[in-house]
Amino acid sequence: MTYVVTESCIRCKYTDCVDVCPTDAFREGPNFLVIDPDECIDCTLCVAECPVEAIFADDDVPADQQAFTALNAELAQKWKPIIERKPALTDADAWAAIKDKRGELDRG
């Protein structure tokens, strides 16, 4: 099992999760984070740290978010690791409550 970052992270990119990851499994895109499934050790530490509840175990990803499992794997191969906490995007708080954000994903 691995963990998956879902739609709630888009245009927010809070990095609280990055601080607690013991394997540096997070990858950073322009406005979204993903978890590299090959690096994730299923420790669950990141789940509680995410202020927008965007991280799920792959077995628990909501049905309408299933595409994010493959998306995390795909983008983890393209994006660089993020190993230190950074400030969230400047308008993250405004985007945190918005549910339908898939069209906002910047694959950079």
Image (cartoon, helix red, strand yellow):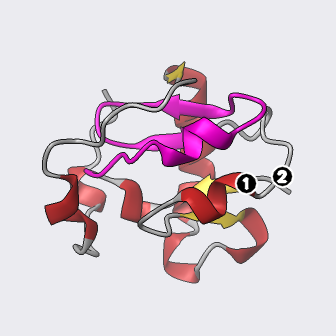
Within-10-Å neighbours for mark 1: few <14, some 14–19, many 20+:
some
Q: Is residue 5 above or below residue 100?
A: above
Is there CB contact under 8 Å for labels 1 and 2? yes
Number of numbered discs overlaid on the protein picture: 2
- Residue at image mark 1: 45
Quadrant placement of the C terminus: top left
What segment carries the magenta color?
11-35
Within-10-Å neighbours for mark 2: few <14, some 14–19, many 20+:
few
Q: Position of residue 87 (x, y in %)?
A: 31, 36
Q: Nearer the viewer, residue 101 or 24?
A: 24
Separation of marks 1 and 2 at Cα, in angstroms: 6 Å
Q: Tell me: 106 left or right of 74.
A: left
Does the magenta segment cover residue 6? no
Q: Residue at x 29, y 52 (%)?
A: 12
Does the magenta segment cover residue 17? yes
Q: Is residue 39 above or below residue 42?
A: above
- Residue at image mark 2: 43
Among the 4 quarters of the image, the one containing residue 45: bottom right
Q: Residue at x 50, y 46 (%)?
A: 16
Q: Residue at x 51, y 59 (%)?
A: 50
Q: Position of residue 55 (x, y in %)?
A: 58, 62
- Element marked by disc 1: helix
Name the residue at the bottom extreme.
Answer: 63
Q: Amino acid at mark 1?
A: Leu
Q: Position of residue 18 (x, y in %)?
A: 57, 38
Q: Amino acid at mark 2?
A: Cys
Q: Tell me: 45 left or right of 78.
A: right
Q: Is residue 51 above or below residue 35?
A: below
Quadrant placement of the N terminus: bottom right
